[in-house]
Every structure is written in structure tokens, then in C-alpha cells.
Amino acid sequence: MARRNDHTREQLIALTLDTVKDFLEQNSYHELSLRKIANMIGYVPSTLVNVFGNYNLLLLHVVAQTLDELSEEAKNVVGGSVDHKTALYQLAYCYHDFAQKHPHRWQLIFEHNMNGEALPEWQSQRIDSMTGMLEHLLRVLAPERSEDEVLKASRVLWSGVHGITLLSVDDKFFAADPIDGKELIDNLLTNYLVNW
């Protein structure tokens, strides 16, 4: 076992989060526990509790880093788009592609539960940043729409894209022929925007 002074607090945080993210590249978070993570990095569980507060908060830090990565990719595709409508499509495709690349980490984002604890502000800000990107694009595309209409439209589109992505990642379309999730996303956005 590593001794308490083998790593600084910052190094221990980085080591722990990197180890969990590496594990999640091949395995579900359901296979993790505080004890298992501690064993993987050569520490005792109580050290991780001292650093993160509890197992739930440790996982929330993994979720935060995953959202940061998704946000960075989303900003890059939106910033590289030729116009706002294209950016909206690219943002949705980015979401889908990220989930396909990192299914277990993406699953953790949406299945993680605070078990009655309040969501920390640092995590709320990450979520607001992601939904804010979509809201901004919709505002630019339809400046005549009210804030309430933009908010509702953003949630409808996000819910639709999320549902398609979820079914795509889990391969649950139950069709004889393979279905491309991005084609369904394209269909959803095109038809929604025409009527919106």
C-alpha cells in the first residue's frame, strides 16, 4: 500500500480520477466500489474518503471531468461550424459521438445519483454551460422566440437527441436492419426546426 505522503493531495486526486476513467473505458461503473478504486491505486478506502468526502462525490468528480471533455469537444465543433444551423446539428452529432466513444462514462453522467444531497454549484455550472450552448444556438436561429419558448425547445431537442443516443449506444432500436443514430438525429432536428 502507498503511504499517505507518497502523493500530494492534488496528485492523489488526479491518480484516482484517471484510474476510474481508464476503468470506465472498458467497464461499467456498476463494477466499481470505493474499496476497488482504493486497491487499484494502492491506498486504503479511508484515504479516498478523506480526499473526496465520500464515494458519491468521488464519482461526481469523474462525471465533472467527463462533462468538461464533452463541453470542450462541443465548443470545438460549434466554433468550427459555418453557420448556426450547422452548429446545432454538429452539437447534436458531437453528443452522440461522445457517447459512442465513451459509453460507460456517458452512462455514469446520467445514472449518477446524489442520494438526497444537494448538487454542488461547480457541477450545476457545468450542466448550465452545456444546456446554454444549445439555448444560444436556438436564440440566434429564432430571435423572435421568447426565452420560455427557447428553453422548452432546447429541452425537447436535448431529450430527443438524448433518447436517440441512449438507444444507439445500447443498440436497442429493435430493427431488422442497423439504424444510424445520426440519421435519426438529423430527421428529428430537421422536422422540429421546420415546425418551430
Image (cartoon, grey):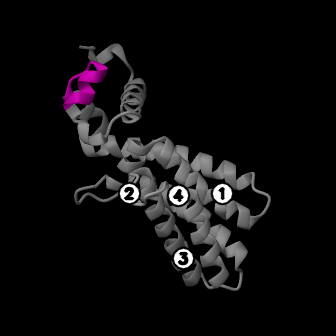
Image check: 95 left or right of 143? left
Amino acid bearing label 1: Gln
The prevailing secondary structure element of the residues shown in magenta is: helix
Residue drawn 47% across the image and 62% down it? 164
Circles 1, 4 touching at the beta carbon (< 8 Å): no
Q: Nearer the viewer, residue 6 or 29?
A: 29
Amino acid bearing label 4: Gly
Q: What element carries label 2?
A: loop
Looking at marks 3 and 1 on the same chain, the residue that comes earlier in the sequence is marked by 1
Q: Nearest to the eye among marks 3 and 4: give it.
A: 4
Up-down relation of residue 101 to residue 17 (above or below): below
In three-dimensional space, the C-alpha distance between marks 3 and 1, rounded to whole angstroms, equals 19 Å
Image check: 29 left or right of 105? left
The magenta-colored residue range is 35-45
Return the x and y of residue 194 as percentages of the image width and height. Answer: 67, 80
Q: Nearer the viewer, residue 104 or 64?
A: 104
Which residue in the structure is indicated by mark 4? 181
Looking at marks 3 and 2 on the same chain, the residue that comes earlier in the sequence is marked by 3
Up-down relation of residue 35 to residue 77 (above or below): above
In three-dimensional space, the C-alpha distance between marks 2 and 4, rounded to whole angstroms, equals 11 Å
Which residue in the structure is indicated by mark 1? 90
Looking at marks 2 and 1 on the same chain, the residue that comes earlier in the sequence is marked by 1
Which residue in the structure is indicated by mark 2? 172
Circles 3, 4 touching at the beta carbon (< 8 Å): no
Looking at marks 3 and 4 on the same chain, the residue that comes earlier in the sequence is marked by 3
In three-dimensional space, the C-alpha distance between marks 1 and 4, rounded to whole angstroms, equals 13 Å
Q: Nearest to the eye among marks 1 and 4: give it.
A: 4
Q: Quadrant of the N terminus?
A: top left
Q: Quadrant of residue 151?
A: bottom right
